[in-house]
Amino acid sequence: MSLRKARAAVASAPEIEAAAEEVLGRGNAIDAVVAGVFAACAVSPGVLLGPVQILVGGAGAGLLAIDGRVRQPGVGAPRPRGFTSAEDIPDAARVGVPWLPAALSVAVATMGSATFNQVVTPAVALAKGTPRAELLKRIASRGPRALEERPLSEELLAAAGRPSGGLLTVDDLASPQPEVQKASRVALGAEHAARAARDAASGKAQSRSFAAELARKKNAAGEPEPRVLVTFPWTHLAAGLPAPPAHAVEVARVRAVAAVDRNATFAIACWDEATDGLFIPELGLRAPFFAEPVRRGQTRIRPGEPRAAAGPVALVGSVAAPELALAAFGATDAYDVLGQALESLAVDERLEAHGEARLVALAHANATASVLRG
């Protein structure tokens, strides 16, 4: 564990963490995670056209979420005949509508303190020498509308539009309108927090961990405060813990960045680092396969419908505000590792998890930010 005063950032890769920390020095936690996601777009071709999901929490910020998942394409176009079981389905038909740039823009515009150009600048430097550098510069100056304007729109439509057997349309590229939503809250081990508080009062508790400090917290009435698990409103829960979406998703490809600022506002974002998809050399991007091809005789997924994406991240804290951010990534058991950490926090007042996935966490207590890695 390393301690950092007042604010800190942590991410799934050093260059992403560095970009988040750079912006955190002059912005807030939301600015930092947006800078981290753009940095991921710079170093990996499979990020910008994929999904992003953002959680924000703090006493002054509330508990909020932004849904930047990929959408099903085909807005404004007639239903195609659909592919038969005997036909080969082109890669273009599996490419969805990217909402990531628009979601990041909404996050900065509604909750950030830096300018959009400032949060994209570190990514432009990281992308130097690749086609993504010019693309990111254009996004920095034009915002998410850059994807619906020439020449970027022409490249996207040529690669994943009707001429190539895809479903992507001009209306799709103009459709992203992410909104700031209220995050979901569920009680996490309230009875265990009460027991830990009683043990601490009687001198039985020996731990002085951050989790134990949470367990000893009391509300205005002097009663132990139940811990609250904060998740995306679209998160699938099983036994009160985050679980993979009902539809098959590539959990192992998820990456994350989290930050907490001097105001104890947390932000955490996760995305998909696609290793397969339709590569567009002119843009230096790989479009991941999130869309469902239209199949003859089967119900068509409505254009504009969000496509399932993994998000093994969470905020934990009191009813008033989160005090801990957690993310698991890098392996198919990421949800299991996250669940173990949350159960350990609720039952044993400590953070512990075992598995293939990596676990990172940020804590903020007594004006001190702590970074934990496992």
Image: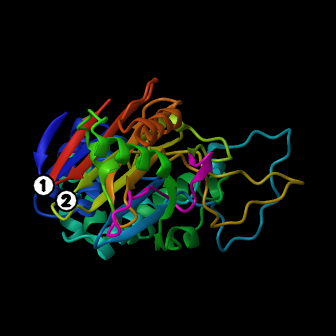
What secondary structure do most residues of the magenta stretch adopt? loop
Residue 312: give x, y in percent of width and height.
48, 44
Which residue bears the numbered disc 1?
6
Residue 343: give x, y in percent of width and height.
48, 38
Which residue bears the numbered disc 2?
261
Vertical order, 306 against 357 (above or below): below
At 22% across and 61% down in the image, what residue appears? 264
Q: Residues within 10 Å of mark 2 (few under 14, many from 20)?
A: many
Left or right of 197: which side holds 297?
right
Q: Nearer the viewer, residue 302 or 59?
A: 59
Left or right of 26: which side holds 344?
right
What is the magenta range? 219-241
Q: Secondary structure at mark 2?
A: loop
Left or right of 60: which side holds 225?
right
Q: Residues within 10 Å of mark 1 (few under 14, many from 20)?
A: some
At 75% across and 70% down in the image, what residue appears? 78
Three-letter code, disc 1: Ala
